[in-house]
Image: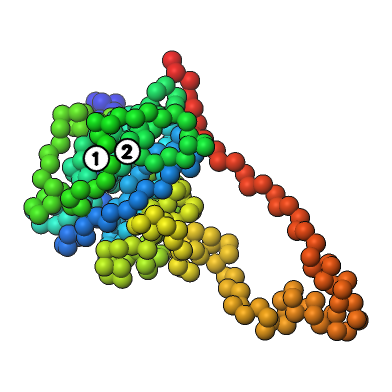
Amino acid sequence: MKKIASVFMVLLIVSAASVKAYAQISIGVSVNIAPPVLPTYTQPPCPVDGYLWTPGYWAYDQDGGYYWVPGVWVSPPRVGYLWTPGYWGYDGAVYVFHEGYWAPHIGFYGGVNYGYGYVGTGYVGGRWAGNSFQYNTAVVNVNNTVVHNTYINKTVINNNVTVNNNSFNGPGGVTAKPQPQEQAAEKESHIQPTADQITHRQVAVKDPSQFAKNNNGHPATAAMNKVNGSRFTQEGSRAQPSVRANAAANPAHAGNAAPSADNSANSHSPARRTNVAAVNNGAARAAAQHSNRAPRRQALAPREERPHRERQR
């Protein structure tokens, strides 16, 4: 009898742990106010073969309110897995955020049309073909110099941008219900957002220009080509991170002071030191020749790692 009771307790603990893990994946914070509408923006090109697009979304901070997490290309945690975006849903009293996840198939993401392949149900921006991901360039933007696994499906070409801008599921927003295939995907093995995705969100929350209360729904950085990579405005031009966002992305350099805008007035600048030396020793020509030498070549940056490929069985 004691043995049966022990087995029952083990099963109960495992079951509770599974429910808790699933809850962490599916349910996030709850808010009394609906999120702002989705901003329209230009998608930056995919920078690395094998990266997948994760659309931008409004997250919530207890102190600052809603802030925009830029859309970004990321490396999937496993070959064959796709990203189901998170979404806000109204449960009759509050707006609840359902966290996104990785799985073999796309699950329900509230019917929200995030654009660039995420048209409210499923994903039409690409597909896995064995160990390689193929991109539908009728829908997504890629760097053709590094990404060659592409195809064109023109039947979805009109769905590559957000149309209605609704950012939540519920009254006043999207009223979609989960389809059978989406419900089946919910029961598959899930992988939570990767460490890069978590870092990406943490950088966004430290940037005041990303908060709706400061940008009126128009974030300074709408999208990025990769985590800690280049930033882009809604129009697709390069954006500059705020000081706080830059410090969050590069904590090792957070304490470095910004250089003076007027280097000519700085007696410690290279140009100033050269002029002083020339006056003191009469070697103006030698100093000028020395300053005109070609700089040494910088070491090449490490190559981007592609997602781990698993052998098909």
Q: Which part of the image, by quadrant, shows the N terminus?
A: top left
Circle 2 SS class: loop
Please name whichever residue, 233 or 186, is drawn nearer the observer in this view of the structure.
233
Identified by mark 2, the residue type is Val
SS assignment at label 1: helix
Q: Earlier in the sequence, mark 2 or mark 1?
A: 2
Q: Residue at x 63, y 47 (%)?
A: 301
Q: Position of residue 252 (x, y in %)?
A: 58, 62
Residue projecting furthest to the front: 285
Residue 128: image location, x then y, percent: 38, 27
Residue under circle 1?
159
Residue at image point 20% right, 41% down: 120
Q: Where residue 87 appears, x then y in whole percent?
A: 23, 48
Q: Quadrant of residue 142?
A: top left
Separation (CA) of disc 2 from disc 1: 7 Å
Q: Position of residue 272 (x, y in %)?
A: 75, 79
Looking at the image, do the residues carrying marks 2 and 1 touch, with CB atoms under 8 Å apart? yes
Q: Residue furthest top?
A: 313
Q: Nearer the viewer, residue 311 or 127?
A: 127
Q: Nearer the viewer, residue 99 or 162?
A: 162
Sort mark 2 into few (<14), some (14-19) or many (20+) by Cα contacts within 10 Å: many
Against 29, is 289 above or below? below
Name the residue: 53% across, 60% down. 250
Q: Which residue is mark 2?
A: 139
Q: Amino acid at mark 1?
A: Asn
Residue 84 visible, this angle? no
**Position of 213 relative to 126 (above/below):** below
Residue 288 showing in the rendered view: yes
Instruction: Report the number of discs.
Output: 2
